[in-house]
Amino acid sequence: MTRFLSKYHAGMAPYVPGEQPRDKKYVKLNTNENPYSPSPSVIAAISAAEVGRLNLYSDPDCTALNQAIAHTHGVNFEQVITGNGSDELLAFAYMAFCVGKKAIFPDISYGFYPVFARLFGVEYQEIPLKADFTVDPRDYYSAGGTIIIANPNAPTGIALTRAQIADIAAHNPNNLVVVDEAYVDFGGESALPLVGEYDNILVVRTFSKSRSLAGLRVGYAISTPEVIAELNMMKFSFNPYNVDRLAIVAGAASVLDKGYFEDRLELIKDTRKEFAKRLVEQGYEVLPTCANFVFAKHPLLCGKTLYLALKENGVLVRWFNKARISDYVRITIGTPEQMEQYFVAADAAERAAQ
Ligand SMILES: Cc1ncc(COP(=O)(O)O)c(C=O)c1O
């Protein structure tokens, strides 16, 4: 620690992203990326002409991208904000709706939630998931702060129904409910239809998973025009050009190519079904997932042993050294060939353990 670091930040534990190794080529099933390339129209949108305009700042209102998103979801332009990944929008939500209040989220969820709380000096409360790893909406009634729920949850993949989200919103008229729908396209029920009904729901989405654009860094949020205006207040006080020129055109192209998007989603859902079935046949415990990953417990090997042995055999999955879930690994759904490689590596792991 240098003598320059502010006292407030001393000892801070930042978010640790999943490994992005460069030492050898792994089958990467650890960060819930999409195994398929983005739509060809995305690649075409990043044209020489647009690259040639990089001398100019990007549109601070992200007009082309926000219009495409608004059109797709049948909401008004004023109800949409885009960010440099959904992480940035979550950070804006903490700044706008948590500072000086409390943030409330499940004890097992996206690891960034407590990190943002610490960064922005926000008091937070973690509510334990039930024994079966589900969220009980009643635990969030009259929560006394801003609620943040990943739906489907990560790393479990388990989703609340839309009615359950509505129940939480209805019991918190004076608290905002942030619904982080990073994985919703893979099978969850979106809370977007509730946005017209409740004024206390903010839905946050990402292009990183279902749209194969993790490297582009685009996320978006939808809520009432008033809530979005307050997020814009944060954005314009922090980084007005938060989405770059290439991300704006490429993101818009991705939204407009509905067919490509839906086809790839079906492929991943089919692969997930097959993969989960085979895991169960092999004795794994597999949580019911609505996401592009499964959270699974090997019948014999503990989570850490399995994770390390898979890595040794060229397959990366995610393991969390945390109470209640340390016997599980989170495995991203890749291509059918990649899932085959998972089983080859897992066989090797089992043999090594004998
Ligand atoms: C639940 C959840 N929310 C948000 C994000 C952030 O996504 P991005 O910043 O890539 O949009 C992730 C990424 O893994 C996630 O798992």
Image (spheres, helix red, strand yellow):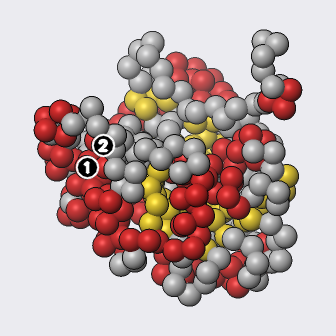
Residue type at numbered disc 1 = Val
Q: Which residue shows up at 54% across the image and 51% down it?
A: 235
Any mark on residue 249, and which?
Answer: 1
Q: Nearer the viewer, residue 200 or 155?
A: 200
The image quarter in which residue 307 lies: top right
Q: How many marks are shown on the rendered structure? A: 2
User: Residue 28, position in %: x, y?
Assistant: 43, 32
Q: Which residue shows up at 82% across the image and 57% down it?
A: 100
Is residue 354 among what the camera can see? Answer: no
Is residue 30 among what the camera can see? Answer: yes
User: The residue tagged with tag 1: helix, strand or loop?
Assistant: helix
Alpha carbons under labels 2 and 1: distance apart = 7 Å
User: The residue tagged with tag 2: helix, strand or loop?
Assistant: helix
Residue type at numbered disc 2 = Arg
In the image, is 146 to the left or to the right of 235? right
Task: Determine crowd level at label 2: few under 14, some 14-19, many 20+ residues with C-alpha closer than 10 A.
Answer: many
In the image, is 46 to the left or to the right of 98? left
Look at the numbered disc 2 and say if its residue's Cβ is closer than 8 Å to ligand 1.
no
User: Residue 103, position in %: x, y?
Assistant: 78, 58
In the depicted structure, whether residue 225 falls above or below residue 263: below
Task: Determine crowd level at label 1: few under 14, some 14-19, many 20+ residues with C-alpha closer than 10 A.
Answer: many
The image quarter in which residue 213 lies: top left
Residue identified by numbered label 2: 245
For the C terminus, which image quadrant?
top right
In the depicted structure, whether residue 318 falls above or below residue 97: above
Q: Nearer the viewer, residue 276 or 264?
A: 264
Look at the numbered disc 1 and say if its residue's Cβ is closer than 8 Å to ligand 1.
no
Q: Which residue shows up at 53% across the image and 59% down it?
A: 232
In the depicted structure, whether residue 154 falls above or below residue 81: above
The image quarter in which residue 57 lies: top left
Query: Is mark 2 in CB contact (under 8 Å) with mark 1?
Result: yes
